[in-house]
Image (cartoon, rainbow, N blue to C red):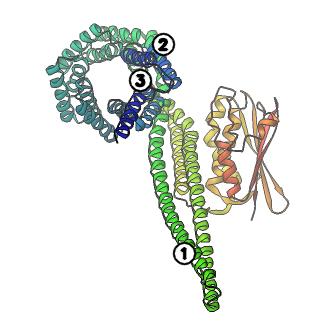
Amino acid sequence: MRKLIFTILFMVSAWGVWCQKPAGGSTMDTTMVLQMNSQSNALIDKNTTQALSIAEAALKLSQNIRYTRGEIMSYNNIGWAYYRRNEFTKSFDNSLKALKLNEEIGDIKQRGVSYMNIAAVYNGQNNFSKSIEYFLLALQLSKELADTLTISRALNNIAYTYLKDKKLDEALKFANQANEVIRQHQSPSSYTLRMLGDIWLAKGNKQLAKQYFEKSYAEAVQLNNNFLIITNLNRLGKVAALNNDAASSLQYFQQAIAIGEPQGFRDELDQAYLGAANAFHALKMDTSAFTTLKKYQVLHDSIYNETTIKKIAELQAVYENERKETEISFLKKQQAADSKTLTKQRQLTGLLVAGVFLLIATASIYYLRDKDKRQANAALERRQLELDKKNKAIEKQREELTVLTQELQATSLLKDKVFSIIAHDLRSPLASLSGTMYLLDKDAISMDEFLQIRFHLNKQLHALNSTLENLLHWSKSQIEGNSTIDKKQIELKTIADNAVNLLQGNAEQKQIQIHNQIEAGAQAMADADHIDIVVRNLLSNAIKFTPNGGQITLTSEELINNQIKVTIADTGLGIENDSIEKLFTVNNHFTRYGTNREKGTGIGLLVCKEFIEKNDGTIGATSTVGKGSNFYFILPQV
């Protein structure tokens, strides 16, 4: 008994040592990871480029020594650094990686950091309810740990979210709570002072707001916190502009630009450029105003495109949660099936043992009672039949499990395609509309110029709305498992005209001429929405890979067996033969840059193949490198 107790204590002790030391790494390695992450965290608001580089190096070292806690800290620091750079998709992705790894070790502090990062991304896309939800989760965890700094940070962020949602009284309540926590623990108060300034400015008290901004700025300078410095400079510049003090406003914004450009604070730099341009304009310095406004437009468009992508990040997060729930449901079904199978196997084993025992007993009295022997044999045969039936039932259950697994995989693939299609079909039109809408800002154009572009703008909005509606209908039917196709006689020239009109602006930018030579009256039996998406994808690709001044021609040709062939030919770059084989296959996902460095997702041709095949058609391509490509599809006419 004494030896047994000693053995158990030894095993527990060994287990504790193993848990404290990562596999493959020394104490010195883990200390290095912790120091690197601490340094990265301290630099995020001072030099994001350096902070990101250190965090990525810490991640690599953590992975090499298999130090899970170090990986989590590194992912969280990388996520926050990307958030400061306004790269929300990367921020969201790294925070999710930290959360998933944290399921293994349950680090409460790092889970709170992940929640803060995710809440900040939701805040950036104005999803205030989600942002508040995750900030409150982070606040609860920080209170469990009695972490004063994180408590005040969470309260500040909740106040900021309510401020953006224009709930000023709620914002002021949480900001005052943060200020009280900081006052009691004598912690740095720069963020809270800036938050109180924001709230009072929103309430219309410019004088009180300026006092808070100046106090926050002074403390930020002492802390060498570049992010706080630039944010306060932008706010002081805004207050000066509201007070019609253009000279002071310009000075503040120029100081912000000097800090923001080398540090990569894109969102704050965006505001500084715009504020400086307005100040130059007010001071009649039109050349400087125009130059600064151009810098603002380039940066603003970049941030806008990232904002569009980060909306997909929210969809991806919803999808990940849904997929996890599906997997859990599947595992529960599998566990129940396995349990049922095990129970039946035990029953069968018992029956088999009983049968063997009966056989032995019958054999021992064989010579005494021949009649009993025959009855025993008959009973054994019946049991064997029952055993065969139960074995078949088990096999059937295994087949059902296999089908469930395949259905789960198919569902996951369909959802992945839905997200990719939305990103692929909406990114370019939204960016185009952003550029057009900018012209309508603050007397940038005259009324005559506005009337000239109004028709074009309405046309773009109508086309974009139609595209979004078609994609959402298709994605909904895929997710709900509804594969019904609305096949009817469709006019191919009309569909092609719509696609040409939608993409004409893209072609004009590259001086590409599009000739729609599809025969009037050419018809096919197919789903109109599906073929509309196919034609737009193929035409968009042709524009992308055709150089400036090129030609694109759409033609139709009636084939035998009541079929019709539509071809979209371009004078573009062309494709190598071995690459053509990869265009329409999921396993060999293929994409490349266009002639003007246009980047695609590579999913468009996969969607085209799926839609054409659902409509009983075929799709293909021929190409000559340097001369151009012909993409075609064939559909039934009846």
Q: Is residue 571 left or right of residue 149?
A: right
Q: Name the element at disc 1.
A: helix
Residue 539 vs 112, above or below: the answer is below
Q: Which mark's residue is nearer the viewer, 2 or 3?
A: 3
Marks 2/1: CA–CA distance: 94 Å
Q: CA distance from mark 2 to mark 3?
A: 35 Å
Find residue 116 and report its image quarter: top left
- Which residue lies at the image location 32% right of the left edge and 17% below the top edge? 231
Give me the disc on residue 291: 2
Q: Position of residue 164 (x, y in %)?
A: 29, 32
Tell me whether the residue at label 2 lies in contact with that at label 3, contact meaning CB atoms closer than 8 angstroms. Answer: no
Looking at the image, residue 344 lies above or below residue 213: below
Q: Which residue is mark 1?
A: 354
What SS does tag 3 mark? helix
Report the quarter where the N terminus lies: top left
Q: Residue under label 3, please give it.
A: 77
* Residue 566, image x, y percentages: 76, 50
The kind of residue tagged 3 is Asn
Report if the CB atoms under discs 2 and 1 are less than 8 Å apart: no
- 33 sits left or right of 406 in the view: left
Q: Nearer the viewer, mark 1 or mark 3?
A: 1
**Residue 70 at what x, y percent from top left?**
43, 25
Q: Amino acid at mark 1?
A: Ala
Q: Which of 458/39 is in front? A: 39
Q: Residues within 10 Å of mark 3 (few under 14, many from 20)?
A: many
Q: Quadrant of the C terminus?
A: bottom right
> What amino acid type is highlighted by mark number 2?
Thr
Label 2: which secondary element: helix
